[in-house]
Image (cartoon, rainbow, N blue to C red):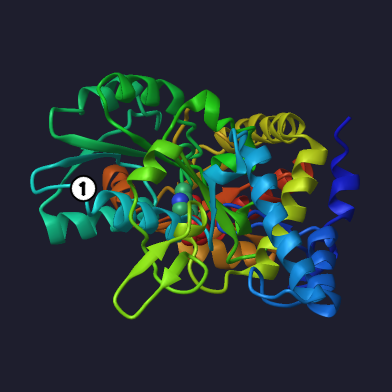
Amino acid sequence: MYNVQTVRKDFPILSREINGKPLVYLDNGASAQKPQAVIDAVTQAYTMEYANVHRGLHTLSTIATEKYEAVRGKLAKFLNAASEDHIVMNSGTTESINLIAYGWAMPRFEPGDEIVLSVMEHHANIVPWHFLRERQGVVLKWVDIDANGDLDPQKVLDAIGPKTRLVAVTHLSNVLGTVVDVKAITEGAHAKGVPVLVDGSQAAVHMPVDVQDIGCDFYAVTGHKLYGPSGSGGIYIRPERQAEMRPFIGGGDMIREVHKDAVTWADPPMKFEAGTPGIVQQIGLGVALEYMMALGMDNIAAHEHHLRDYARARLDGLNWLNVQGQSATKAAVFSFTLNGAAHAHDISTILDKRGIAVRAGQHCAGPLMEHLGVDATCRASFGLYNTVEEVDALVSGLELCHELLS
Ligand code: PLP
C-alpha cells in the first residue's frame, strides 16, 4: 500500500517552510527533490569513496568504478533494456539528444532529408535538429496536436515521407502532461524503415518504461527529474544504431589506442562517454532509481493518477482558469493561464508567497506556446510525494491570484 506520508518523510526538504508557509513543491517537471538515501549516497561517495573511475588500480578508484558502473545496470533494469551495454551514461537528455544529432544523424543525413517532430517537443529535442537544418539543409516536419493536446500517432506516421530519416518525439509533454503512444509511432515508423528517438525525460518519472516493448531506437532520461542529482542521466541506444554512430565528444576513456597519427575507439557504450563523467551524480542516480523501483513504478503511477484526477476536478471548477491540455490519459502536469491579463510570472510570485512552487514561462517549448497562442503559462507538476492537500493549497492560492489580479 502506497503511503504518501511515509514517502514524504524520505525527502527532508519537504519539511521546510518558504515565506513562513509549509513548502508545497509543484515544480517537479523542472527538477524533483531528492530523498535522504540519495543525499546520503552522494555524501558517502565524497566522504569515503571518491576517486576517478576507470583509470586507477588503487582501492578507491576500484570502489568508485564499481559503484559508478553498477548504475549502467540499474538504468538498464529501470528501462528494461536487454543489456547494460545498450545504455550510454551522461549528464542528461540535452547531452543525449546532442549525442544522437552529432554522432548518428550528422554523418548520415543529407540536404532535403527530413526529421519528423511533434509541436510539443522540449527545446532539447528541437534545437539539436535545428543545427542539422542550419548546417546540412535537413528539413524539420512538424506534427500538430489536437484540441485536447493529444498527438495522434497516425498523424505522425502520415508525416513520414520517402526522405524521412528520423521521428523524434516526447513520451510525455512537460507542459501539457500528454502521454504519447510512442509504441504505435515506433511500430508504424519502423514499418516504413524510419528510426525513432523518444525523449523520455518526463515519462520515466511518472510511469513504468519498457524500451523493448516500445521498440524505439533511442530513449533518453534525465537524472535530476528522477529524484537523482543534476548532471546525471543516460540514453538507451539500440545496438544496431550504436554500430552506426560516430563518437561525439573526444577525449579520455572513449578510446582504445591513441597514436600521433591514429586513434581507435573503445567499444560502445564507452565509445560515447568521453572524459571524467559525473561520477558522484551518477552514483546518486543509481540510488534514486532503486528508490523508485522499491516504491514500484506502478504504485507511483497509481498515486499520481489519483492526484491528477483530484486536481483536474478541482481546477475544472475554476471557471476563470484556462487549463491547457485536457488529454484523458495525461499525467499530473497542469499548465494554465488566468482569464484576463494576469501574467504567469505574477501568479507564480503570489503562489510563492504562500510557499507554493510552480513554474512560469515558456517551459522550453516555444513551438507549443505558438501553437497554443500564449506567451507563457504557469505549470503545476506533481511528483510521487505530493498530496491532495497540496492540490487544495494550489487551488486556494489560485483563488487569491484571481482576486488580486483580475
Ligand atoms: N526533454 C523534456 C521533455 C524535458 O522536460 C527536459 C527538462 O526540462 C529536457 C528534455 C531537458 O533535460 P535535461 O535537463 O536533462 O537537459
Residue type, mark 1 in image: Arg
Q: Nearer the viewer, residue 85 or 97?
A: 85
Residue 22 seen anywhere in this rendered image of the structure: yes
Q: Is residue 58 left or right of residue 111?
A: right
Q: Nearer the viewer, residue 399 or 305?
A: 305
Name the residue located 23 percent from the left edge and 54 percent from the top edge: 106
> Where's residue 249, x and y in %?
39, 67
Q: Is residue 38 left or right of residue 152?
A: right
> Where's residue 293, x and y in %?
76, 39
Classify 260 as above or below 184: below
User: Looking at the rendering, which quadrant does residue 233 occupy?
Assistant: bottom right
Q: Nearer the viewer, residue 274 or 38?
A: 274
Q: Element type at marker 1?
A: loop
Q: Is residue 64 left or right of residue 239?
A: right
Classify 356 as above or below 336: below
User: Looking at the rendering, which quadrant does residue 342 occupy?
Assistant: bottom left
Residue indicated by mark 1 = 108
> Where's residue 154, x and y in %?
30, 19
Name the residue located 38 percent from the left edge and 57 percent from the top edge: 99
Tally of numbered tags: 1
> Where's residue 64, x and y in %?
75, 68
Classify 159 as above or below 383: above
Residue 385 seen anywhere in this rendered image of the structure: no
Q: Residues within 10 Å of mark 1 (few under 14, many from 20)?
A: some
The N terminus - image quarter: top right
Name the residue located 56 percent from the left edge and 45 percent from the top edge: 85
| Mark 1 CB near ligand 1 (8 Å cut) | no
